Image (cartoon, rainbow, N blue to C red):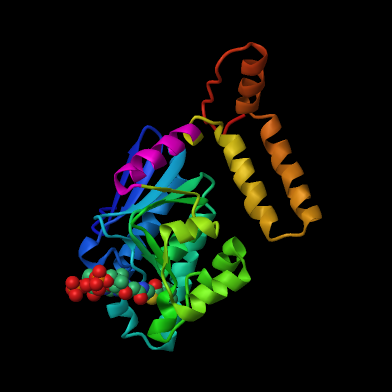
Amino acid sequence: MDYNNIIFRVEEGIGTIIFNRPKALNALNSELLEEFSCALDEISGNEDIRVLILTGAGEKSFVAGADITELAKFNSLEGKIFAKKGQSIISKLQELSIPVIAAVNGFALGGGSEIALACDFIYASEKAMFGLPEINLGIIPGFGGTQRLPRLIGINKAKEMIFTGRMITASEALGVGMVNKVVVPEALMDETVKTAKIIASKGRVSLRAAKQAINGGINADLATGCRIEVDSFALCISSRDAKEGTSAFLEKRKTDFKGTLKD
Ligand code: CO8
């Protein structure tokens, strides 16, 4: 597919999607969402991609939310269709078997924060601003924000953000555990790629199993979560990567994970 609203590239096993409507602060219109969805399908079908990075074009914004010019015209049914479509794309993002890092370079508002929240973790530029300002538009977050934000930062802090619509700075986001690392704007991509490369050097099967165990267990009770972990552990122990990892340790050499899903 030709992409007009995103840039999608793959280098050394690292996929990068850049939301690319800088004149509208990379707001999510239907066309961009469709392209994002197709790129996620491409990534799911490409075993060479080991880690995905999401970021925004331009210096100002990651994604400033859903495109309000589109939202303003929706009736209830259209709103429901749009929200369902957005949620299914964001679930697709969360369910990717590979790790996903959001490199938030500027505004991550509404749907933009919700995309970042569905990533495995967030690195942010000092200039980043996070918020769920939907209340100011007379609506509520519709791409999973009322669900993922409280799970990540706690119910009371999430309620304060959602009820006031107030934006928080990158350092506040760091303080509440929404963001893992804050760096100067020029260092954001380098820092993110550095971490992505470390992750990409690990075994694909064990990365997949770890993500599956964490995501599967987080909303379950501890006993269920531990059962998921046992199954995920069993999945990777017989993999080629596990043989490589254990042999490399015993032979006192560096690991060379092939990243294949075949055992
Ligand atoms: N949609 C469309 N256009 C936008 C958006 C947006 N979300 N955000 C910014 N733009 C456009 C502006 O209209 C402007 O365009 P133009 O130059 O043609 O006038 C351009 O981007 C630059 O924006 P500003 O001039 O406003 O830049 P400022 O630096 O003054 O302000 C802000 C930046 C604070 C980010 C400001 O633009 C803003 O508040 N934007 C809206 C943010 C927002 O409310 N986002 C939430 C949207 S709702 C949402 O995401 C819900 C998701 C779930 C939907 C469920 C479906 C029913």
Q: Which residues are magenta?
A: 184-198
Residue 170 visible here: yes
Q: Position of residue 207 (x, y in %)?
A: 58, 39
The residue furthest right is 223
Q: Main secondary structure of the magenta part?
A: helix
The residue nearer to you, when weighing 251 against 38, is 251
x 66%, y 54%: residue:
216
Quarter of the image for residue 242 reads top right
State the image coordinates of residue 32 (x, y, percent, origin top left). 31, 63
Q: In what quadrant does ligand 1 lie?
A: bottom left
Q: Does residue 197 belong to the magenta stretch?
A: yes
Give left or right: position of 247 versus 193: right
Measured from the top left, where is residue 140 in percent x and y?
Answer: 47, 80
- Residue 32: say if magenta: no
- In the picture as drawn, the residue positioned furthest to the left comes out as 23
- Indicate the quadrant containing the C terminus: top left, top right, bottom left or bottom right: top right
Rendered image quadrant of residue 133: bottom left
* Residue 35 found in image quarter: bottom left
Residue 178 seen in the figure: no
Can you say whether 29 is above or below 220 in the image? below
Q: Position of residue 18 (x, y in %)?
A: 31, 52
Residue drawn at x 47%, y 61% as measured from the top left: 172
Looking at the image, which residue is at 35% across and 50% down?
Answer: 17
Relative to 42, residue 80 above or below: below
